[in-house]
Image (cartoon, helix red, strand yellow):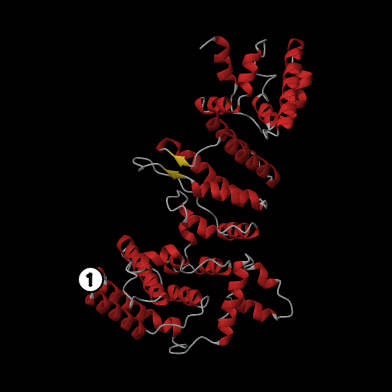
């Protein structure tokens, strides 16, 4: 590598796009006279390039790329060259991108962004920095599939989401782009000897991302299901069943009020018997009860093993379960009905000599657990169909949810009292 090339590699320190507009204006006054001819030639070449692209109908924003690439020109880069060939090489987008990746400039730029955001508490400044960071990722076509050595890219994006919430950034498109970026990131292969740092998101972060997703009509829950290998562990907190099993009432009502599906397709597949040709398999509401009880049992078992204590208060789990069931039109199930459904499924499989494919003993244990919860869940509604009022609530919420208008759309309903709005928003039984 010759001397000029080594100087070039040392000079492009972090692709500082933060103040490139100001640097471009200072360029006319700070460069040496010997560089005027080169800069004039560069501007002429860009204008000619743009003119030919316009004539041929080619869409290529070469001006912005050149601006980003030469922004540190007056301070670092020596332009003492008369070679048109070298200038054309610099304008070649693919080779520029390869140069950036080979010299690991994006890693340095990410560190620069992190330091700059740490020094800024203003929401506007944070938003500008985040927009430019995402623009650079798009320009350099950074892959979502990471190696073990690139996991720090995910850790940065996940932390930027936390910073966006703390700075109260209100650019919904920006927040959704950050969410997509963090969800899409996954590791190629197994991670051994490398602990991935997950941000400790503060209270209110869930409502923050759900609200911005609603504004952009972005189905956050479905997007997480489409990326099961995501490194973003917070995506697991979008499960209503998991929130119920943890007895977390605030998270449960936040998810339900924003229209998160109680029993999405991926959880149905986990709970079902996977044999659709057997007609007498359990229906969706029975599967939901067993699936929820399974999560509750798993959580309690883990807590008892770790703390040797009683686990989570069953009353808080029961309150969350009742809240979840109030968001759907199905009637409350009696333990005897669940017992009958479990036995019916078992004997249906036995007729096909497949009884070993049914976790009969485990399901009966979950049925016994449900019986202990039942008096707290539906003692006042046992054996009764859902009221017309409840069915109307579910129908209205379904219509608003399909239009991404939950919970904001409820407050905009006219000519109905506040008590009815509270009922529609699951704040009342």
Residue in the picture at 61% in, 76% down? 396
Residue in the picture at 58% in, 15% down? 7
For the view shown, which residue lies furthest in the right direction?
A: 29
Pointer 1: what residue?
A: 354
- Left or right, 310 with reference to 322: left
Q: Quadrant of residue 192?
A: top left
Residue in the picture at 58% in, 12% down? 4
Which one is in front, 305 or 374?
374
Image spot of residue 276 (x, y percent): 34, 70
For the view shown, which residue lies furthest in the left direction?
A: 353
Image spot of residue 176 (x, y percent): 60, 51
Image spot of residue 217 (x, y percent): 62, 59
Vertical position of residue 40 compared to residue 55: above or below: above
Which one is in front, 174 or 197?
174
Vertical position of residue 382 compared to residue 52: above or below: below
Image spot of residue 427 (x, y percent): 59, 76
Vertical position of residue 389 compared to residue 245: above or below: below
- Left or right, 21 with reference to 104: right
Q: Quadrant of residue 428?
A: bottom right
**Element carrying mark 1:** loop
- Left or right, 54 with reference to 138: right
Q: Quadrant of residue 245?
A: bottom left
Kindly tell me whether residue 7 is visible in this rendering.
Answer: yes
Residue in the picture at 33% in, 76% down? 279
Kindly tell me whether residue 310 is visible in this rendering.
Answer: no
- Locate the C terminus by quadrant: bottom right
Vertical position of residue 408 compared to residue 215: above or below: below
């Amino acid at each position: 590598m010759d001397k000029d090339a080594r100087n070039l590699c040392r000079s492009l320190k972090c692709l500082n796009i933060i103040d490139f507009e100001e640097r471009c204006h200072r360029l006319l006054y700070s460069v040496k006279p010997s560089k005027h001819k080169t800069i004039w030639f560069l501007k002429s070449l860009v204008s000619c390039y743009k003119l030919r692209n316009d004539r041929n109908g080619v869409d290529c924003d070469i001006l912005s790329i050149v601006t980003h690439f030469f922004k540190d020109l007056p301070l670092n880069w020596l332009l003492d060259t008369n070679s048109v060939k070298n200038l054309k090489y610099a304008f070649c987008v693919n080779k520029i991108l390869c140069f950036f990746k080979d010299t690991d400039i994006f890693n340095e730029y990410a560190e620069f962004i992190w330091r700059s955001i740490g020094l800024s508490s203003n929401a506007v400044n944070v938003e500008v920095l985040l927009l430019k960071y995402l623009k650079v990722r798009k320009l350099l076509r950074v892959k979502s599939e990471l190696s073990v050595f690139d996991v720090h890219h995910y850790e940065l994006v996940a932390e930027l989401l936390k910073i966006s919430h703390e700075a109260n950034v209100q650019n919904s498109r920006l927040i959704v782009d950050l969410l997509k970026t963090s969800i899409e990131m996954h590791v190629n292969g197994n991670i051994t000897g490398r602990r991935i740092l997950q941000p400790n998101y503060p209270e209110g972060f869930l409502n923050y991302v759900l609200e911005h997703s609603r504004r952009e009509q972005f189905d956050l829950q479905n997007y997480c299901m489409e990326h099961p290998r995501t490194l973003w562990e917070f995506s697991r907190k979008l499960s209503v069943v998991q929130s119920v099993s943890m007895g977390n009432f605030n998270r449960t009502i936040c998810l339900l009020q924003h229209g998160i599906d109680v029993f999405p397709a991926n959880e149905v597949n986990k709970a079902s018997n996977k044999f659709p040709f057997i007609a007498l398999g359990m229906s969706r509401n029975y599967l939901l009860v067993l699936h929820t009880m399974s999560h509750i049992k798993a959580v309690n078992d883990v807590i008892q093993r770790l703390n040797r204590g009683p686990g989570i208060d069953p009353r808080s789990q029961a309150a969350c379960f009742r809240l979840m069931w109030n968001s759907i039109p199905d009637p409350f199930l009696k333990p005897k009905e669940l017992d009958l459904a479990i036995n019916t499924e078992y004997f249906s499989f036995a007729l096909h000599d497949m009884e070993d494919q049914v976790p009969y003993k485990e399901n009966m244990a979950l049925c016994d657990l449900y019986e202990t919860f039942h008096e707290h869940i539906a003692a006042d509604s046992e054996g009764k169909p859902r009221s017309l009022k409840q069915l109307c609530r579910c129908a209205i919420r379904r219509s608003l949810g399909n239009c991404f208008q939950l919970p904001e759309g409820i407050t905009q309903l006219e000519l109905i009292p506040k008590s009815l709005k509270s009922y529609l928003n699951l704040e009342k039984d």
